[in-house]
Amino acid sequence: MKISVIIPVYNAEKYVTNAVESALQFDEVFEVILVEDKSPDNALKVCKTLAEKHERVKLFQHPDKGNHGAGASRNLGIKAASGDYIAFLDADDFYLPNRFDAERELFKNPEVEGVYGAIGVHYWSEKAKEQYFNIYQDRLTTVYKNHPAKDVFPGLIGMRGSFGLFSIDALTIRKSALDKMDALMKTDLKLHQDTDFLMRLAFYTKLYPGILDEPVAVRGVHESNRISQVDSGKVKPASTRVLLWKHLKNWAQNEPKMPKEQLLHIKRIHRSFEIANAPFLKKWGMVLKYLVKDFRSIRSGLYNINFRKELF
């Protein structure tokens, strides 16, 4: 196996060295691709030092050396990668020693196009733990049981009940499988572009479970995590998720192979977040409208804990 590990780097000078070293521990990691995204801190200097020190570390920036977001940075890394497999790692996260144990066996089967696993949590400071422990605690982010590849996409969009989820840090994909995608990461999504990517990837490719009952990578939580600020409510979650589901709805409507039942489900989830994000009077007008016109849209939303928090 020749694995290219792609690390987008923004405002991560304190953490990126740990991320890189956690990837370099594996012989299968052919290269670590750092994509520095015009960080306001000294991350570029740290990245240059890492590239000089380690032959397998390669440093890239966007052609204009500007800031383009995690999605565009990962896309640049994918295009630059020369390995047969692609793995991802955020600059403030890190891999554990068992990261590719399942991949070594599963990828012997040519039908396996991607492998996903579980991730754990590490708090980089006591302050971060105080702020975010009530959200993440010490729980695994994982899929709760082994599922056939055909059930992964319906599971991720919420059609398989208590399915769980997996992080991009715990995904390894054959690079050739990405040719099936309609597009790589959506660059106009500032948040949740990885979630959008994983859902579309699950539709087009065959993803298999790896290690689900223990972490293969760790999410590093600190005070300036952008996604932690969404999860904690500092950034209004419905306003970011409505954009995610709008993208998914638009994609699903234009995908000729999308089953009708799955398209309708995506539309209903999008509507539920639209309602949650609407001003007070409009919100209740939309609730009444869909109670009459499409009760399942409201019911789908009411089963979603984030929707309930926003609505009530």
Image: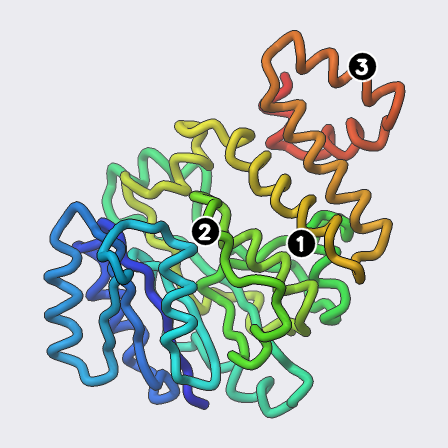
- Residue at the image position 27 percent from the left and 58 percent from the top: 9
Total labels drawn: 3
What amino acid does circle 3 point to? Leu
Between discs 1 and 3, the one toward the N terminus: 1
Q: Nearer the viewer, mark 2 or mark 1?
A: 2
Between discs 2 and 1, the one toward the N terminus: 1
Q: Which mark is residue 288?
A: 3
On screen, residue 275 above or below 39: above
Residue matched to label 2: 187
In this picture, residue 149 sits left or right of residue 102 = right
| SS assignment at label 3 | helix
What amino acid does circle 1 point to? Leu
Any part of residue 114 in sight: no
- Residue at the image position 71 percent from the left and 31 percent from the top: 271
| SS assignment at label 1 | helix
- Residue at the image position 38 percent from the left and 35 percent from the top: 229
Q: Real-space Cα distance between discs 2 and 3?
A: 35 Å
Q: Which mark is residue 156?
A: 1
Q: Nearer the viewer, mark 1 or mark 3?
A: 3
